[in-house]
Amino acid sequence: MYAIIETGGKQYRVQPGEVVQVETVPGDVGSTVELTQVRLVQQDSGLVVGQPWVDRASVTAEIVTQGRTRSIMVFKKLRRKNYRRTKGHRQAFTRLRITGISVA
């Protein structure tokens, strides 16, 4: 059984027991989160496709980690104009452990 969920403007294929890294989801480490924007669910009885969401479907997950990725450097330059800008960026993320997929 697997599902395709949407969170943070991106889509992820998840199944129970899997750990997935997504855009920041509010919550404390150890708490559970219910993701209701489910695009597709593959069950033993067949495939359920939403338009755009599957009705009464949800994915429950446990927050494993809240963190930030490695730093990247953003550098801008215009030649012959003495224009240079350097900026760093660290993207925040949440690591989730998928505990269950339900379709009521």
Image: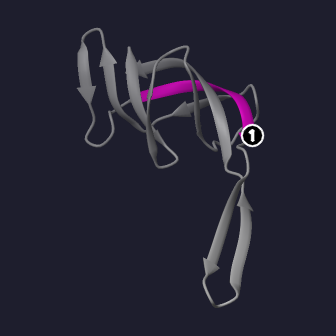
Q: Is residue 101 left or right of residue 41?
A: right
Q: Is residue 57 left or right of residue 65?
A: left
Residue shown at 73% from the left, 70% from the top = 86
What residue would you read off at disc 1? 67
Image quadrant occupied by the N terminus? top left
Q: Nearer the viewer, residue 8 or 90?
A: 90
Image quadrant occupied by the C terminus? top left
Q: Amino acid at mark 1?
A: Gly
State the image coordinates of residue 38 (x, y, percent, origin top left).
Answer: 39, 34
Q: Quadrant of residue 97?
A: top right
Residue shown at 39% from the left, 19% from the top = 2
Mark 1: secondary structure: strand
Q: What secondary structure is the stretch in magenta mostly built from?
A: strand
Q: Is residue 83 visible?
A: yes
Q: Is residue 81 left or right of residue 3?
A: right
**Segment colored magenta:** 57-67
Neighbor class of circle 1 (other Cα within 10 Å; few <14, some 14-19, many 20+) is few
**Extreme residue in the front direction:** 80
State the image coordinates of residue 67 (x, y, percent, origin top left).
Answer: 74, 40
Residue shown at 66% from the left, 68% from the top = 75
